[in-house]
Amino acid sequence: MIEVKEPRRPIPIIGSLKGMLIVGKHLFRKPVTVQYPEVRQELPKRFRFRIFLNLDECVGCTLCEQVCPNGSIHMQSVERENPRNKRKIYPDVNFGTCTVCRNCEEICPTDAIYLTHVFETSRTRNSFTYSPEELAMNEDEVKK
Amino acid sequence: MSLYSTLLGFFSFLGYPLSNAAAYLFESIFLLLAASLSLVFMIYLFRKYMARVQLRIGPNRVGKFGLLQLIADVFKLVQKESLFPKNRDDLPYRIAPVMVIIGLMLAFAVIPYGSFFYFGSLTVSDTGVSVILLFAILSIMPIGEVLAGISSRNKYALLGALRAVAKDISFEIPMMISVLAIIMMASARTSAPLSIDSIVVTEVLPYGILQPIGISVFLVAMIARASYSPFDMGESDSELITGFSTEYSGMRFGMFYAGLFGSILLGSFVVSLFYLGGFNGPFSGDLGAVWLGIKALILVIISFTVWLSMPRIRIDKFVNFGWKYLLPLAMINLVISGALTLMTGW
């Protein structure tokens, strides 16, 4: 038969005092808050979020649309003279549903679509879809 | 020399009746200003302290270091609509928050603050029976809370009020008995043991050292009276929304909020006066108020630490604690201090 040990009865006030001590110790630790607009958090070097598109390189093969796991990428027709892209179709990206899986970057045969370190992509309107031209622009230029 | 006589001298060009009235008026205005400013400071201190303990920064956007955050909060609360429940009991519903604030401000008037350089004694009102007066005033605030709970016609508010009553009854008695021990000790050394001022003057050796049981009972009772975290039965955030103040909004809610922080400050003042020597200290002729402030501030920090580190006690355990532990402890303290006073003469 297994003998079950009764746990020792704690002395009443000691536990509370220990808790108070821990609370007091936390007072002298550094706050973890990052004051965002003034101070930016150091992100890891390999962090990637914003998708860029090189319009001159894109051949319109639609591989990125096919590989996108949640349908964030759709091909759009853009009137643009590019001898390599005869069908004149380029991808757009909906950042609202993009999970940053980087499949599109991996599959792209010409390295036209790639992810960058930029992460501040807040939009004022409830539209997170970047058209192919916007994907080719800097974040500052994309103003909606 | 007191604040009153300083003001009387300042207004002496008006003739006696007018200068007397002006002195009283300005004394009251100073008191109200100082009390409300200290309340604002208390809430700021609490938010900053809580934030630092939780590894945050706390208010830091409005004004330097967020010092004006509380002013902004007050403006926000004033602008907000004060909602009235449909089935309320109108008069009690309206006067309940005012009663809480009035009880708080009156209690601040009775406390002897000690002297501060040019102004002399900062005490606003000094009577020969200020201990009784103080505790009579302190019993106004619970009435406001109970009225708020009952008149809201809300089950949560009613339950909160009932719990607040249970809390007040079970903790006021040990508190008063431990004050009785203080008065008993003081009566051996002064002819006016019911005046807080003369009690503090006799405290060459602080009563907290002579009555270690007394100070712990009184501190716990004061924490229970202010009703914050280990004993926040009246509010019971997770069960009763916010207890008796559930139906209040806008500045009426702000008054209850101020009442909570005010009673923490008041409790710290009272404990430091009765048990820690109050305004006694080096150069207490000039720096008495500063000593009292420092002692009260340390107690306030301790109270905040208690608040932030302890969970709420269940209501039955809590009433048990009041009647079965604190009351006998207070009695034992009374007997011990009586024997001490009889045998040693101090």
Image: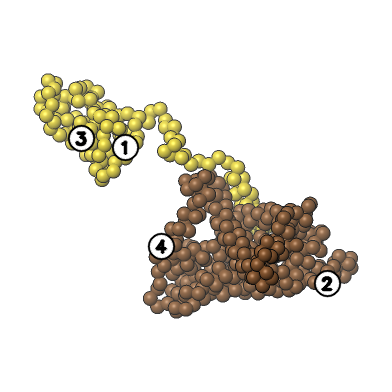
Chain colours: A yellow, B brown
Q: In the image, are marks 2 and 4 on the same chain?
A: yes
Please tell me in which quadrant of the rendered image residue A68 appears. Answer: top left
Residue visible at 47% across and 75% down in the picture: B93
Q: Are marks 3 and 4 in contact (CB under 8 Å)?
A: no
**Secondary structure found at label 2:** loop
x, y percent for residue A30:
55, 40
The residue under the point 34% across, 31% down is A118
Q: Mark 3 lies on which chain?
A: A
Look at the image and tell me in which quarter the N terminus of chain A lies: bottom right
Mark 3 or mark 1, which has the lower sequence index?
Answer: 1
Residue position marked by numbered label 1 in the rendering: A121
Crowding at mark 2 (Cα within 10 Å: few <14, some 14-19, many 20+): few
Q: Where residue B191 is drawn, which disc sits there?
A: 2
Residue located 47% across and 56% down the image: B73
Q: In this view, does A81 lie above or below B152?
A: above
Q: Which mark is residue A131?
A: 3
Mark 3 vs mark 4: tell me if same chain. Answer: no
The amino acid pointed to by label 2 is Ser
Taking B249 as reference, is A17 left or right? right
Task: Say what secondary structure mark 3 lies in.
Answer: loop
Residue B85 at what x, y percent from top left? Answer: 40, 73
Read off the residue under disc 4. B80
Measured Cα–Cα span from mark 3 to mark 4? 43 Å
